[in-house]
Amino acid sequence: MTYAVRKTLILSTALAFAGAFGATQADAKKKPDIQYAPTYAPVPPMPVQPNGSIYQASVGYAPLTSGSRASMVGDTITITLVEKTQASKSNSADAGRTGSIALTPPATGPLSHIVNSSDIASSGTNSFTGKGAATQSNALSGEVTVTIAQVFPNGTMLVRGQKALTLNRGDEFIQISGIIRGADISPDNRIPSTRVADAKIIYTGKGEIARASSQGWLQRFFTRISPF
């Protein structure tokens, strides 16, 4: 086997491995995260013997003032996505400095023949101008119904869930988790995303549209190893 053939085989193997590794990483990032899986209501305990009391804490409790608002683990809440962010930044700088020095030699005497006026005159100029600007804006709207995963003693609730859409040109995933207050839930069990604390909202997709807007595996390989 000649040196050129061996070199070609080694290069082809390296590129194939890099492509498979890059594709595996890309697919792993786009898979739905298991931590956004829905939370189901716990299995109710065995019925207790009737004791004549109307209030039975073993089957769950919700005050009459809350109506039909979600309040227990497994209840569903619709989160209205109203995310909109906009940021801009700009700066500029301008600096300048000018200096000069000159000495007049004597017009008479022995030094007048040695020193010339042009030899002892100097000047300098320094200037700098810089400018930069950056602008970024994002918007996300829609609705995602999630489930209550945990209820804390202070009345706040941990909610999480996801929505998977399979379209004719690819798949889309919307994942959200965060902490909400029971007082912020509307009578129809809706809450805006701006009322979700520690919110994690992920919007991803895969398919031919997503692939067309990303670099190919060979280009990603050379981007990783390029020192420039």
Image: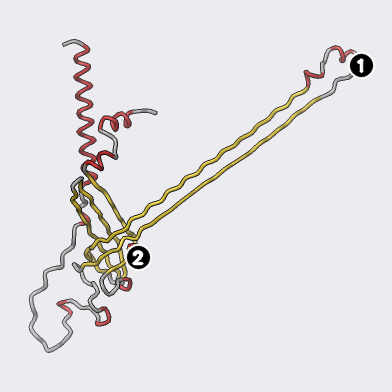
Real-space Cα separation, disc 2 to disc 1, in angstroms: 89 Å
Percent coordinates x, y for residue 158 in the rendering: 27, 64
Please tell me whether mark 2 sits on a helix, a strand or a loop: helix
Nearest-to-viewer mark from 2 and 1: 2
- Is 194 rendered above or below residue 128? below
Where's the N terminus, which quadrant? top left
Q: Position of residue 13 (x, y in %)?
A: 19, 24
Label ID, residue 195: 2
59 lies above or below 7: below
| Rendered location of residue 120, percent (x, y) | 78, 21
Residue at x 32%, y 65% (from the top left corner): 192
- Disc 2: CA contacts within 10 A as few (<14), some (14-19) or many (>=20): some
What residue do we see at 62% from left, 40% from top? 94
Q: Residue at x 66, y 36 (%)?
A: 96
Which residue type carries mark 2? Arg
Quarter of the image containing the C terminus? Answer: top left
Left or right of residue 135: residue 14: left
Residue 155 percent coordinates (x, y) = 29, 72
Q: Residue at x 47, y 45 (%)?
A: 134
Q: Which mark is residue 108?
A: 1
Q: From the viewer's perspective, is residue 83 above or below residue 133? A: below
Place residue 221 in its image quadrant.
Answer: top left
Which SS class for mark 1?
Answer: loop
Residue 24 sits in quarter: top left
Q: Nearer the viewer, residue 57 or 180?
A: 180
